[in-house]
Image (cartoon, grey):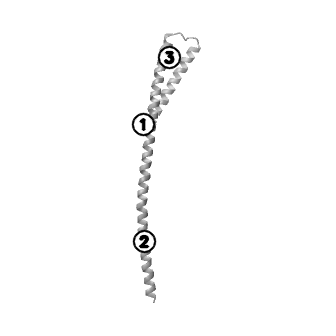
Amino acid sequence: MKVDRLSKELDKKTSALNKAENRVFEFRLMGNNTSPETENQAESFIYRKDALDTLRRRVSVEKEKHHECMKETERITLNGLQTGFCRVFESLTEFSRAAFSMYGELSSMEITGNR
């Protein structure tokens, strides 16, 4: 959930920055590129791009943490299944031995009973 939240935040901020850059670019194309406001916007874009890069790194770190947690969960689950299946097979083995023994006893009773 943390990765999803950070990814959405990154997408929103990236989209907002792209829209702002497009507005400034259009403004400059109209020939109004010498205003001090344009210089302030350029500095603001540099700051915002740095903030986006920081957020991208944070998302990347969180994705890696999530991936490692998923691997660990998978490992624990598989280990638990393997341990659980060992017990199931041991129980099946015991049941098979008991059934085989009972069948042997029934067979010997039939043989001795019929004579």
Which label number is shown at residue 42? 3
Q: Considering depth in this image, is 112 or 4 the residue closer to the camera?
A: 112
1 versus 32 height, above or below: below
Instruction: Please say if the residues under marks 1 and 3 sit with CB atoms less than 8 Å apart.
Output: no
Q: CA separation, marks 1 and 2? A: 52 Å
Q: CA separation, marks 1 and 3? A: 31 Å
Which label number is shown at residue 93? none
Q: Position of residue 4 (x, y in %)?
A: 46, 36
Q: Which mark is in front, 1 or 2? A: 2
Residue at x 41%, y 58% (from the top left corner): 84
Q: Position of residue 98 (x, y in %)?
A: 41, 72
Residue at x 42%, y 43% (from the top left corner): 69
Q: Which mark is in front, 2 or 3? A: 2
SS for tag 1? helix
Instruction: Please say if the residues under marks 2 and 3 sit with CB atoms less than 8 Å apart.
Output: no
* Residue at image mark 2: 97
SS for tag 3? helix
Q: Residues within 10 Å of mark 3 (few under 14, many from 20)?
A: some
Q: Amino acid at mark 3?
A: Ala
Residue at x 43%, y 49% (from the top left corner): 75
Q: Residues within 10 Å of mark 1 (few under 14, many from 20)?
A: few
Circle nearer the N terminus (2, 3): 3
* Residue at image mark 1: 2
Q: Quadrant of the C terminus?
A: bottom left
Q: Amino acid at mark 1?
A: Lys
SS for tag 2? helix
